[in-house]
Amino acid sequence: MSEKQNDVIYEDTLPGGTHWSMLVRKGTTLRLIDKEGGANVGMLFYNPMNKLERYNAPDTL
């Protein structure tokens, strides 16, 4: 793995109950870390060019 692939391009810390959104390009890794434990995350991922194309967790199981 090259060094460039490990570069962090964005980092943020969010308090509980916060909403957040960002355009994440294809091939980018999104890492969510619960620093204190006990977190619960709700997420919605979709293709901004085709809003009918979206991530559906049950389809991946």
Image (cartoon, rainbow, N blue to C red):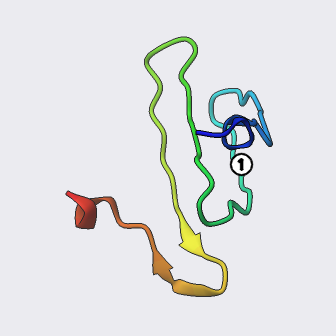
Disc 1 on helix, strand or loop? loop
Judge by depth and name the residue closer to the eye, 8 or 53: 8
* Left or right: residue 60 compared with residue 28: left
Give the amino acid type for the residue marked by disc 1 in the picture: Trp
| Quarter in which the N terminus is drawn | top right
x 25%, y 67%: residue = 59
Residue position for label 1: 20
- Quadrant where the image shows the C terminus: bottom left
Q: Nearer the viewer, residue 20 or 6?
A: 6
Frontmost residue, 34 versus 6: 6
> Measuring 51% from the left and 53% from the top, which residue is drawn there?
43
Measuring from the top left, give residue 34's x and y in whole percent. Answer: 53, 22
| Residue at 74 percent of width and 57 percent of height | 22
Q: Nearer the viewer, residue 5 or 60?
A: 5
Give the image location of residue 16, x and y in percent: 63, 28
> In the rendered picture of this protein, how many numbered marks are placed on residues?
1
Where residue 45 sits in the image (x, y, percent)? 53, 64
Residue 55 drawn above or below residue 17 = below
x 55%, y 72%: residue = 46
Q: Which quarter of the picture shows residue 38? A: top left
Answer few, some or many: residues within 10 Å of disc 1's Cα (few below 14, many 20 plus, some between 14 and 19).
few
> Which of the 4 image quarters holds residue 17?
top right
Report the residue that reaches farthest toward the left: 61
Quarter where residue 49 is shown: bottom right
Seen from this angle, which residue lies furthest front?
2
